[in-house]
Image (cartoon, helix red, strand yellow):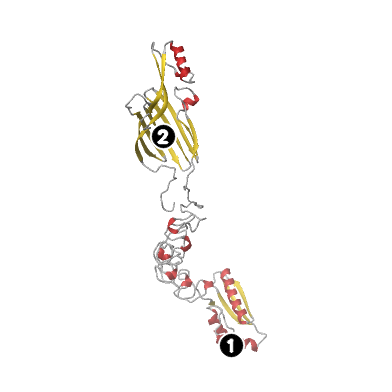
Amino acid sequence: MDGKLRAAEEMSKYLFRIGVSLLDIGQINYNTQTLYSATGRSGTLQRATLAYKGPDELQGQLINQFGLASGAETRAGTMLLPRTTSVQFDVYLGRSWYGNVVYQTAVPLPTTAGLYRGRMLAFGPRSEGPGGELAGTVYYYPDIQKVALGLHIKAGIFILGSDNLLGIFGDNGLAPHAYAGLTIPVKARRPKDRDKDQVSDKDDQCPDMPGVLRFAGCPDTDNDGIQDKDDLCPNMAGPLANNGCPDTDRDGVLDKDDLCPEVAGPTALKGCPDADGDGVSDKFDECPTIVGPVNMAGCPDSDRDGVRDSRDLCQNEVGLIQLEGCLLRNRTVLPDSVSTSDSLLISQLGQVFVRGSRLESSVLSMLMNRLNAQPAGKLVVQLSGQNPQQLQAVKQLFESEFRRIGLPVRVSTIVQPGVETGFLVRFE
């Protein structure tokens, strides 16, 4: 938490430990104590059969039991406590598990007047966690050849256990003991961390959003060292110089704006290369190794008629797009009856119409004067050829132009097999 390795206060924090203890050093002083004696045949005194009520009653019971005279003396005395040496060894096994061994043996007393504790060997596993503790222990008493099984449980503040489960649920010749209690920690509390990001709420500037300690608990989703609020590309790792955005091909165009993020290219072409240097990036250049204009998708148009060379059927003619780069064929034949002025106008119209419907200003002026002078007359453009689609496209081209300039011109089409698309012009 907050960059520090912490553990619950009640948990062990060691790899191993060794301890040696000397227990029950001292004595009990009695102002009065009664010493009993009896002489007679040998036997076993069963204390459980003696109903202890007082010195006089006990003396009487001894006489009744052994049939011998007995004596009792009351005076001050001292009783030594059962001094014991204890050696402990505890080791961390991993994953919150520990193993421990304890050996206890009595310390010889300088007098026979005292209490004695027999030898004991205990061993078993123990598991500790933030929420509690669980331990199992095997007790072996070599002096009396007895074995006991113990269990210790700690859940929250509650403690429950026994050193002799076999004695509780059966009879193994040892007195069973059970214990229960509770622990109340003082000044031991876990720091609050609502978003579980290991940054405590008191230091977390984004307490409801998991983050990293480096940015006071605020997120850095792509782990690029730039927190999300300052990262222009929070889901893609990138350097600080690019405000957290990557530039995979290092061409100065960020991946988020780079149309070719894996291949370096100029900024003007949004990071895409231009092998032929024609200003059309290879990504969109249909002729990437041949220089061509932008409006031709990077492909050459030698005659600049709007039809790229690879599709231009007449590369040496500035033709129509509708005819795949070829000119219209002028099939106009002037009859002898046509006036000189009409003949000149029709001839000039023919020179213009081979390249399309766009009229030059001088020719347009002559045509408008002719139509104004003879309102009943009408210009007719008749298209002919073997390709119906081309005829229709050229017709639409002419009609659109004539509508634009407001001239009463009639355009018609005739399909003629084996004939290139062309026209003838006449006045009606």
Q: Residue at x 61, y 82 (%)?
A: 405
Regarding mark 2 in the picture, which secondary structure is present there? strand
Q: Residue at x 42, y 69 (%)?
A: 267
Distance of label 2 from label 1 (alpha carbons): 115 Å
Q: Position of residue 83 (x, y in %)?
A: 36, 30
Q: Position of residue 358 (x, y in %)?
A: 55, 80
Quarter in which the C terminus is drawn:
bottom right
Dot 2 alpha-carbon crowd within 10 angstroms: few under 14, some 14 to 19, many 20 or more: some
Comparing 233 with 395, the one in front is: 233
Q: Position of residue 145 (x, y in %)?
A: 38, 22
Comparing 254 with 171, the one in front is: 171
Q: Which label sits on residue 366?
A: 1
Give, as a three-letter code, the residue at label 2. Answer: Pro
Quarter occupied by residue 265: bottom left
In this rendering, is residue 87 above or below 191?
above
Would you name the residue on which mark 2 appears? 125
Regarding mark 1 in the picture, which secondary structure is present there? helix
